[in-house]
Image: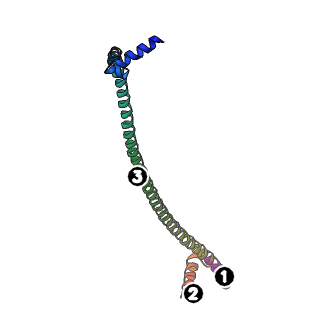
């Protein structure tokens, strides 16, 4: 116990740092250890760590920049796609409209051709009817000539030759036509 008291008394007598309870030698050793440790850490730990952190920050910044560029490119691409879609829709509408016009033209041409063909068929039919009518008249005239010849023979009681017969028939026909 005596030893503790003397030590306590010795500490109270010292002035300066000793008065604060700080040992100068220990403080100097701790300061040198701190500076040495700081220098070692700065040289071998802080610089590589800062380099890694800087590289990571640059990578992150590059990633953010690339992300922003990709968003801009995506927006531009979407605008291009919208423009292409609008152009495609417009072109499709034009194709549909031209197809409808072409269809109407084809239908009109087909109708004209059908009308022309019908007119041709009608003309052919009229011509055929006229031919058939002329042929029927000829047959009817021959039959009429035969009937008149027979009737003349029956009335006159004599056979008339062909020349005289046709002259009489023509005279009779002309008399009826007037």
- Tell me the magenta residue range: 144-150
User: Residue sitting at 36 percent across and 37 percent down?
Assistant: 65
- Residue 147 is covered by the magenta coloring: yes
- Secondary structure, mark 3, is helix
Say whether disc 1 or disc 3 marks the residue closer to the N-terminus. 3
Q: Name the quadrant containing residue 174.
A: bottom right
Say whether disc 2 or disc 3 marks the residue closer to the N-terminus. 3
Q: Is residue 13 visible?
A: yes
Residue bearing the label numbered 2: 176
Specify few, some or many for label 2: CA neighbours under 10 Å numbering under 14, 14-19, or 20 or more: few
- Secondary structure, mark 1, is helix
Colour scheme employed for the rendering of this structure? rainbow
- Residue 37 is covered by the magenta coloring: no
Q: Is 33 rendered above or below residue 138?
A: above
Instruction: Tell me how far mark 1 sits from mark 3, CA to CA.
Output: 92 Å
- Secondary structure, mark 2, is helix
Q: Position of residue 47 (x, y in %)?
A: 33, 22
Q: Name the quadrant containing residue 31.
A: top left
Q: Is residue 135 left or right of residue 25?
A: right
User: Residue sitting at 40 percent across and 52 percent down?
Assistant: 87
Residue bearing the label numbered 1: 151
Q: Nearer the viewer, mark 2 or mark 3?
A: 3
Residue bearing the label numbered 3: 87
């Amino acid at each position: 116990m005596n030893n503790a008291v003397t030590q306590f008394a010795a500490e109270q007598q010292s002035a300066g740092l000793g008065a604060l309870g700080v040992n100068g030698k220990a403080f100097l050793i701790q300061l040198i250890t701190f500076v040495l440790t700081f220098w070692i850490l700065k040289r071998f730990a802080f610089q590589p760590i800062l380099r890694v952190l800087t590289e990571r920050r640059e990578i992150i910044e590059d990633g953010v920049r690339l992300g922003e560029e990709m968003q801009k490119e995506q927006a531009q691409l979407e605008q291009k796609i919208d423009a292409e879609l609008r152009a495609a829709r417009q072109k499709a509408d034009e194709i549909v409209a031209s197809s409808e016009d072409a269809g109407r033209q084809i239908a009109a041409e087909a109708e004209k051709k059908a009308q022309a063909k019908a007119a041709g068929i009608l003309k052919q039919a009229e011509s055929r009817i006229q031919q058939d009518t002329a042929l029927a008249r000829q047959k009817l005239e021959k039959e009429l000539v035969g009937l008149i010849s027979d009737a003349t023979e029956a009335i006159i009681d004599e056979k008339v030759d062909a020349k005289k017969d046709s002259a009489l028939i023509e005279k009779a026909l002309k008399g009826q036509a007037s």
